[in-house]
Each structure stands twice: as C-alpha cells, then as structure tokens.
Image (spheres, coloured by chain):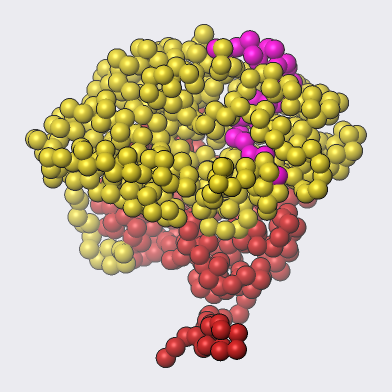
Chain colours: A yellow, B red
Amino acid sequence: MAILNLLLEHRDVPGITNIDVWEAHGGYDGLKRAASSERQTIVDEIKASGLRGRGGAGFPTWIKWNGLPKNYDQPHYVLCNADEGEPGTFKDREMLLKLPHAVVEGIIIAGLATYSKVGYIYIRGEYTEPAWQVRKAIDQAYQKGYLGKNILGTGHDFDLYIHMGAGSYECGEESALMSSLMGERGNPRLKFPHAPLPTVAGVWQSPTLINNVETYCAARWILANSAEKYASYGTERSKGTKIMSVSGHIARPGNYEVEMGTPLMELIREAGGVINGRLKAVIPGGSSVQIKTAEDCEKINLDYESCGANGTLLGSGGFMVFNDLTDIVQLMKRTAEFYMHESCGKCTPCREGTRWMFKVMDRIASGSGQQGDIELLLSIASQVDGRSYCGLGDAACWPIVGAIKAFRSEFEYWIEHKCSPVGSRFVPPQVEPVNPTLALTAK
Amino acid sequence: MTSTSYNALTDTFIPKPLETPSDGDRFSDAAIAELEEIVTHYPERKAACLPALWLAQREYGGSLTPAAIREVAERLQLSYTEVEGVASFYTMYNLKPRGRHHLEVCTCLTCALLGAYDIVHRYEHELGVSIGGTTADGEFTLSEAECLNYCGGATVIQVGDKYFTGVTPDNCLSLIEELRKSNEFTPAHLADSIVKIQTPGASVTGGGSFTSQDLI
C-alpha cells in the first residue's frame, strides 16, 4: 500500500485541461456510461464502491445521492463545494487547476443521478486561477454537448454555473455555503434533526446534493472504470484512495494520492522525509483535527477507522509535518487565532469561546501564563464543543484539547518558565516602521 | 430627532428612508448586461448579490463605497442594509480604499512555520506601515491573510489575482521592486468576470498569465 494515482493519474499530461486531450485519456467515459444507465443504477454503483465523502466528515456518498426525492415536484440542485479553506489542504486547488474536466464530469453525473437540472460550483474567491480553468472546461463541455439541453440524447438538461465566494472559511460548511449561494451572509443554519436534511430542503428549500470536489472526481472514476475495481483498493470500511496535501517541514511538499490504509510513516517517507530535524508531530487531516506525537504516528494508518481509533481524524487530508524545533504552544496559538478570525459570529459558544481560547493561548504564548490556564482552556473547550450551530466550534476545540493531551509538558513549561522550550521562530520581533512619514495613513 | 415614526393604526414603526449617497450610477452598460446575465443563473434576484458586489468592486475602482453598495441594492431590489451586511461579512470586499497593490501575506500554520512572520516584518520595515496599513503614496496595502491553501508552496503571497509562492525572507523584497515597476492596478480580483458564461468559440482571456509556480 502506498502511492496509488487513480484521480491524479493524468495530472501531468500536457494540455489535459483541453477537452480533446481529456477525452483521449478516457475523459467523459464515466458520463457516457451514466447517460446510458438508469438513475438508480448510478446510485447503486456508487454504493457498491463504498465511496465516502472526501470533504472531511466521511459520510457515505450514496446515501446523499439516494436521498433526493424521486419525484419532480420541485427543482433539484447539485452543489460542488470548492470552498477549500482548511489550513494545510490544497488538493481541491490542484484538481480544479489541473483536472477541471474531471470535476465537471463528476458534477454532471451527479446531475443525471439526482434528476437535477442546475448545478453550482462554489469556488472560494481567492481561487481565480483554478476558477478560470473550470470556466474554460465548462465552456468546452457546452460546445461538445455534455452540458446544456438534452445531454447525449438522454433528454436530460443540465446547466452548470460558477459561483465565486469572497473570502470566508465558514462558507465551506454546507449550510453556510447554501446561505452564501442564496446571496446572504455565510451563516450556518440549524441542522438535522432540528431541520430537514439538505437532500430534502436545501438551497431555496429545494432538494440539494452537496459534495466535495474530490468526491465528484472519485464518483467519475468509479463510473468510468468500475465499482469493484475501486472497492478492491483500501481497507474494509474505507475504500479507494485519499489525496493527502503534504506540507510543513518536509522535503517534497505536494499532493500525494495514497491508498486508504497506508501507514502514516510511509507517506512521510514518500514525501522525502522530515527536514531540519527529527519528526516531532503530525496533523494528519487539516488544522481542525488533533495533533499526534511521533510515537503515535507509528501506529496510525491513513484511513477513517485507524485515525478515529487513535484519537484523530483523516479530515480533509491537510497533512502537516512538524520537526523537533516546532513550538506546539505557538502553533496552537496561531490555530486559535485562525478560528477566532473565521468564526462567523452567529452563535454565542463559538463566537465567544474562540475569542476566549485565543486570549488564553496568547497569554501563555507571550509569557504571561498563569497556573490553571490549562484547566481553563479545557473548561472553555468543553463548553464550546458540540454546542455550536456548525462544526466550526468543535473544530476550534479539538486541536487545542489534542495538543494539551499530547504535549501538556510544553504548555506547563511555557507557564512556568515564560519562554519556549524549543526557541521558536513564531515569536514575532517588534519592529518599528523606519520611515514615519510613509506610515501616515496606516490604520 | 427620531429616525422612525410610529403608526398607531397598524401598531408598527415606520423607518424613515436612510439618506444614502447618490452621485449617479457608475455601472457601465457592459457591466449591467453582465449582471443581467448572472441574474438568470439563479431562481431569484437576491442570489446574485455576491457576483454583483464583485462587479461593483470593479466598476468603483477597487473598493465598495456606500454609493457602490446603494447601486447594487437598487439593481437587485434589495435594501441598502441587506447588501451592506453581506459586503461587510466577506473579507475580500474592500470597504476601504486600498493601495495600488494589495499584498496579502499568508501567515497561517504552514507559512508561519516556514517564516511568514519574518516576511511580514521585513515588509513593515520596508514600507513603513503596519499590518492593515496603506503607504502614503497609495502604492501598497499590506495585510495578513488566513490560509490561502497553497501550503505546499509556502510562503504564499497574494497580490490581486496572482499567487506568489516560495517567498522567503531573502527574496521577498524583490517582489516589491517588481510591483513598483509594473503599471497594473491589482487590488480588484478577476472573480467578477469568471461567473459569466463566455461566448462559445471565443478565446477565454485572463486566465493564462499567472506566475505562481506549480506544485511538485
């Protein structure tokens, strides 16, 4: 088990963003097969493959696809979540940039499977460069008749539009994304069981399917090849592959597609190993998941079950590697600052809790920590976790609680000695502007 | 002085119309046509709020002034406050004027780990402004960005539409030199024109000239 390029197989083919080159490499075969199948056959194929959502939660994809009503009382919508914002993750960026047709094809297949006539791809505002590739891909697909009226003679119409976000991490959460798509502030909404599922009443109160970029690409691969082939990779309950975005203190950062169940240490070896020191810790799934020590990493395999059993999550695949010169307390302070900045402010536990946690973390990491601050952090976290509208509140707590569990001695060292146990570069030196006349308009 | 009047008959308070600035509409005919096309993508007019604000930011020269927000509100038949609420929520809408080049340095986890704060301090020192400030000559605005999601190419700096990757404290000043020489105006983003379906057959412009390096 190691590197296994299924979705990223053609990423280095020159001109693959062009539809002719894409078709020459088996592109739109998945769509052609879907077009000649019944709706339920497509859903069954996804079910047989065992595909689980790649956006972070790992929810079985076929349940969503199957959940949309089978009648036509209301319009149905297909949404693609390309609002990638999780620190450490950059897989969607590469997919949109290098394989835009795979994404577009996957969304059209989902449109056929759910009887949707309209799809939206919600791309974060910063991703103008990948969005232009998707724009070109959509326009080419229209010319070839894969989008528009009567796709491939099925009698089914499908239009795909791009919706650009404007810089909000929160909009990657599905109910906030739907608010943002409807032209509102990106605030989340009540969820199941307090409100209907998006598949029943989503965007504009219509049945809505929403999946991540990688999920649609995987669905396309399954239709283009076969569910059995996809299910033959991976472990018993985590099938297929996962794209891991490797960054941090690593020799060759980048996107690596690995078979589910690959040992974590093998991915580090594949990426060239740790640089400038020895391995100290790994965050395997983006900033929202628990940090793991080097000893724990030996036990972890990259699949949903093994990560869960070891007290972390596979998440969105933002795999960050830290060497032994990394100050975990400073790192967690920066994480807390991120969540404080990105909390949308709708619900009190998250809005206030993220600020409190940042204040306490800042106090510790600037040398003013007090005895009892660790307990205070744990207490705040326990009052935010599970009590907010969406997962952002939980995601703000998990890394801090995880870090205290794994590296408690470093927190204690900071509080006692008022300095870093490793001497970190995070500590920003205070620099005064040299030219005061230029600084006149500074805020 | 009260801003509302009470209607005893219906037991409601009637807000007085807000005095919104009006120095004439500034959407060009092309922008109006673009907006009307975008509106057809959605089942209701309100949903075009985000793209309309992108358009307004372009038409009003890089920032959303109260007049820009009023024009968007009128074109989408929404209230001024509703549009202002949306515009103030998202960080990429500039409510204040920005400099000619908007330097957004990613200082999130991986970038911070690999020296993003050193770069920020070098820029602060070079430009003489602190984070969030604009230089007096209006050339540069310096800000800190949350994760730009190109962690494999840390440190990342976003200038307008472009990502500059692999920036280090040693080479970061050459970026400023380069930008000083360029004639472009970069605070606005291209996000306004991507959503528009291009005419079939026409070559798509604007996407080809980016400088960010490829990932390994």
| Between A54 and B94, the one nearer to me in the picture | A54
Is residue A224 one of those drawn in magenta? yes
Q: Residue placed farthest to the bottom in the image?
A: B1
- Tell me, yes or no, if residue B165 can be seen here: no
Residue at point 42% right, 91% down? B1
Residue A11, x across and y down, in percent = 61, 24
Residue B168 vertical position relative to residue A232 in the rendered view, above or below:
below
Residue at left offset 41%, top offset 45%:
A387
Q: Which residues are magenta?
A: A207-235
Q: How many marks?
A: 0
Place residue B102 in its image quadrant. bottom left
Q: Residue at x 71, y 49 (%)?
A: A206
Q: Residue at x 56, y 73 (%)?
A: B80
Can residue B99 be seen here? The reply is: yes
Question: Along the line of sight, which residue is nearer the eye, A323 or A395?
Answer: A395
Q: Up-down: is B200 above or below A319?
A: below
**Left or right placement of residue B20 versus residue A330 in this view:** right
Q: Position of residue B169 (x, y in %)?
A: 30, 39
Q: Is residue A286 above or below residue A341?
A: above
**Nearer-the-camera pick, B151 or A202:** A202
Image coordinates for residue A8, horizontal then vertical, percent? 60, 22
For residue A232, above or below residue A303:
above
State the residue in front, B60 or A119. Answer: A119
Whole-percent x, y for residue B5 in the image: 51, 88
Residue A81 placement, left or right of B105: right
